[in-house]
Image (cartoon, rainbow, N blue to C red):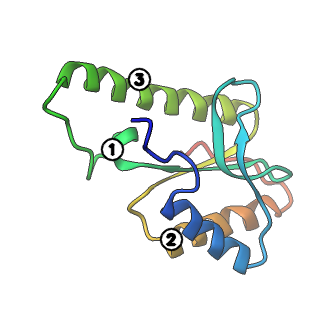
Amino acid sequence: MSRQGSRDTAPEVAVRRLLHAAGMRYRVNVPVPGMPRRTIDIVFPKAKIAIFMDGCFWHGCPEHATQPKANADWWRAKLDKNMARDRETTQHLKAEGWTVLRFWEHEGPAEVAQSVTRAREATAKPGYRPSNHA
């Protein structure tokens, strides 16, 4: 597990490159306000937009998640805990007025960047309120 990359994964970097090329400036690997030991992958702090690029295995993708056969009970508990932590983080950020966008690592970087761009544009509109969608 220690060799698993948790930062600057290929999907994250691909999305960041597209956002940067579109003229958007953001921060990366920012601590979740009020929640120790948790970070947001891509952040637009002023707009309060938090973007998470979730790995299919570690975060329980309904399409691509696999179940290890060795030590199955331990892995199931570990992965369930990861998913519960994701839900808790999303709820916390939304309660603080953030827009939270979660994407799977298998989603196309161009589509992810388009979704982020739409969210970014929406926050610039008068009367904007964050949605309740994750």
* 3D distance between C-alphas at marks 2 and 3: 27 Å
Amino acid carrying label 1: it is Phe
Relative to residue 11, is residue 53 depicted above or below?
above
Relative to residue 105, is residue 24 depicted above or below?
below
Q: Which residue is mark 1?
A: 57
Residue 109 - label: 2
Relative to residue 10, is residue 101 depicted above or below?
above
From the top left corner, tell me how far across and down residue 48 is, in percent: 78, 47
* Pointer 2 or 1: first along the chain: 1
Alpha-carbon neighbours of circle 1 within 10 Å: few (<14), some, or many (≥20)? some
Relative to the observer, which residue lies in front, 133 or 7? 7
Image-based side of 94 in relation to 46, left or right: left
Q: Residue at x 65, y 38 (%)?
A: 39
Relative to the observer, which residue lies in front, 85 or 132? 85
Q: Secondary structure at mark 1?
A: helix
Corner quadrant of residue 74: top left
Q: Which residue is mark 3?
A: 81
Q: Residue at x 21, y 19 (%)?
A: 73
Amino acid carrying label 3: it is Lys
Q: Secondary structure at mark 3?
A: helix
Amino acid carrying label 2: it is Pro
From the top left corner, tell me how far across and down residue 90 is, in percent: 59, 35
